[in-house]
């Protein structure tokens, strides 16, 4: 089968022929219907991110995957051939360390992917693979950040810095739970998209009017840019929470410890999501409360995975999510 693989030592990426895997005991094999392209994949290619627990030097990328089960391993009773599913993007290893598909073990930029049966969630027939594929990560990471880390509740006023692939879904999800949303992004088209997805206010980060949006309950950093954190801290009200999701790979600096302690500010990091976040989002999409039809910027064949990485890295067309189809 064809698969998009990267060498960790050289950061070279190519689509190559590899053996088609078979489902072992407790596993299922999925014929991939769609796989999302994430900025984390770009960061992997650039060397900003590295796998922590990969055995070997090569790995198939792709941690946002949807498809159809075509092979069931011994002992599997929860899945059947023909089930339409998404794949949970990570799991804990034997040492209870978080591992991520497409980084620490082979992902879904391939014709087939094998995973543990407990790491799939069924999706309804009406949910297209292209939309379903991005739920693990692009949608589930902001959902987990909002609900499990930030503990945002209805009526709170919240800012979202960076309304690209993850942040735009944070805007939608915050509105679903009843928060007031301020979206902040330097790109005019991104701000317009945030308004279309329900943001109450939009600003460029250098807009002087943004200073009026202080006293916020929470701010989410999806931009992964250090200056954002300083600006975000200045916007928080008493016991305000700064939740950092975007990765800058730089120190986190508190500009003023007096203000930080006086306001009882909280800074929290967030990574990924759990299986229940994915199933909750599938239910929201199935009920019509969550519309992901505007999230797919482009669909490309697997052979064009390198082009997809380049487009995302250079924000060609300012994509939300590019999706690959084998």
Image (cartoon, grey):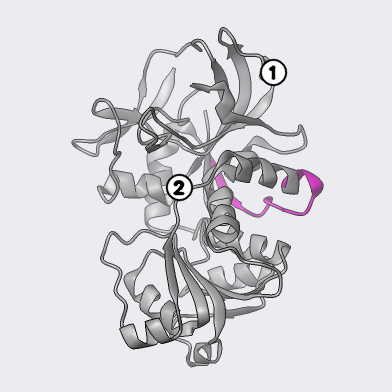
Q: Classify 199 as above or below 1.
A: below
Q: Distance between the residues labelled 1 and 2?
A: 27 Å
Instruction: Using the image, tell me which numbered label, if any, was put on residue 38.
Output: 2
Q: In this view, does 5 lie to the left or right of 317?
A: left
Q: Is 300 covered by the magenta stretch?
A: no
Classify residue 173 by image quadrant.
bottom right
Q: Earlier in the sequence, mark 1 or mark 2?
A: 2
Q: Classify 89 as above or below 82.
A: below
Query: In percent of the image, x 68 and y 27: which residue is there?
Result: 84
Local secondary structure at mark 2: loop
Residue under numbered circle 1: 82
Front position in the image: 168 or 130: 168
Q: Classify 48 as above or below 233.
A: above
Quadrant housing the N terminus: top left
Please give the range of residues in magenta: 285-299
Query: In percent of the image, x 80 and y 47: which residue is there?
Result: 287
Front position in the image: 163 or 3: 163
């Amino acid at each position: 089968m064809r698969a998009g693989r990267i060498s960790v030592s050289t950061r070279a990426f190519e689509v190559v022929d590899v053996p088609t895997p078979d489902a072992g005991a407790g596993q299922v094999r999925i014929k991939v219907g769609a796989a999302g392209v994430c900025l984390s994949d770009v960061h992997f290619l650039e060397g900003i991110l590295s796998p922590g627990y990969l055995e070997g030097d090569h790995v198939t990328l792709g941690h946002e995957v949807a498809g159809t089960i075509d092979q069931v391993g011994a002992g599997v009773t929860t899945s059947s051939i023909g089930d339409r599913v998404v794949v949970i993007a990570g799991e804990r290893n034997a040492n209870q360390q978080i591992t991520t598909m497409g980084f620490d073990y082979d992902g879904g930029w391939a014709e087939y992917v094998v995973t543990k049966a407990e790491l799939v969630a069924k999706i309804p027939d009406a949910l297209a693979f292209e939309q379903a594929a991005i739920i693990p990560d692009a949608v589930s990471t902001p959902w987990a950040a909002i609900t499990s880390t930030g503990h945002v509740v209805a009526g709170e006023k919240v800012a979202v810095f960076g309304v690209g692939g993850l942040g735009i879904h944070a805007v939608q999800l915050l509105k679903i739970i009843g928060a007031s949303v301020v979206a902040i992004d330097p790109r005019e088209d991104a701000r317009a998209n945030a308004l279309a997805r329900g943001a109450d206010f939009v600003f460029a980060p250098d807009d002087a009017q943004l200073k009026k949006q202080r006293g916020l309950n929470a701010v989410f950093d999806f931009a992964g840019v250090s200056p954002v954190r300083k600006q975000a801290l200045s916007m928080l009200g008493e016991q305000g929470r700064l939740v950092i999701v975007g990765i800058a790979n730089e120190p986190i600096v508190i500009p003023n410890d007096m203000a930080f302690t006086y306001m009882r500010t909280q800074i929290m990091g967030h990574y990924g999501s759990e299986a229940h976040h994915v199933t909750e989002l599938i239910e929201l999409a199935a009920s019509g409360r969550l519309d992901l039809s505007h999230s797919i910027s482009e669909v490309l064949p697997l052979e064009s995975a390198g082009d997809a990485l380049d487009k995302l890295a250079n924000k060609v067309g300012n994509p939300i999510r590019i999706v690959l189809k084998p």
